[in-house]
Image: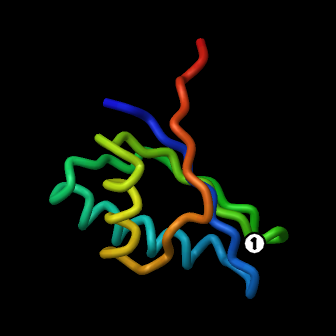
């Protein structure tokens, strides 16, 4: 399954608590699309959120975010894990 890293920029601010809630919503939604959100990172100071996800496509990963909470990533990249 392909691995993706997505990047969200939230210009009006972001809190780790809000991102945790959004991630929980992703986990509730992901199964319908054969997607698995694995991890996320938050930089509150810069309004950035990064999500690591296994998905059949970038579109499937975006669909989960859209359905779960509406916060679609600004960018999404297919990545390969290093050793």
Residue at the limit of the structure toward the top, as seen here: 83
Q: Residues within 10 Å of mark 1 (few under 14, many from 20)?
A: some
Q: Is residue 83 above or below residue 74?
A: above
Instruction: Tell me where residue 69 sits by quadrant.
Output: bottom left
For the residue pair 40 and 76, the one nearer the viewer reads as: 76
Q: Position of residue 15 (x, y in %)?
A: 66, 77
Q: Is residue 22 left or right of residue 32?
A: right
Residue at the limit of the structure toward the left, as seen here: 32
Q: SS at mark 1? A: loop
Residue tagged 1 = 47
Q: Position of residue 19 (x, y in %)?
A: 55, 71
- Report the residue at 61% width, 57% height from top: 75
Instruction: Tell me where residue 53 sits by quadrant.
Output: top left
Instruction: Tell me where residue 27 sits by quadrant.
Output: bottom left
Quarter the N terminus occupies: top left
Q: Position of residue 6 (x, y in %)?
A: 56, 52
Q: Is residue 77 left or right of residue 15?
A: left
Q: Is residue 25 above or below residue 31?
A: below
- Report the residue at 21% width, 55% height from top: 33
- Report the residue at 55% width, 64% height from top: 73
Q: Is residue 9 left or right of residue 63?
A: right
Residue at the limit of the structure toward the right, as seen here: 45
Q: Position of residue 42 (x, y in %)?
A: 67, 61
Color style of the picture:
rainbow
Quarter the C terminus occupies: top right
């Amino acid at each position: 399954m392909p691995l993706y890293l997505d990047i969200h920029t939230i210009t009006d601010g972001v809190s780790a608590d809000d991102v945790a809630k959004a991630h929980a919503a992703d986990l509730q939604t992901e199964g319908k699309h054969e997607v698995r959100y694995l991890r996320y990172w938050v930089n509150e100071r810069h309004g950035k959120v990064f999500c690591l996800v296994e998905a059949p496509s970038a579109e499937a990963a975006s669909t989960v975010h859209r359905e779960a909470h509406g916060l679609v990533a600004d960018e999404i990249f297919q990545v390969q894990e290093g050793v």
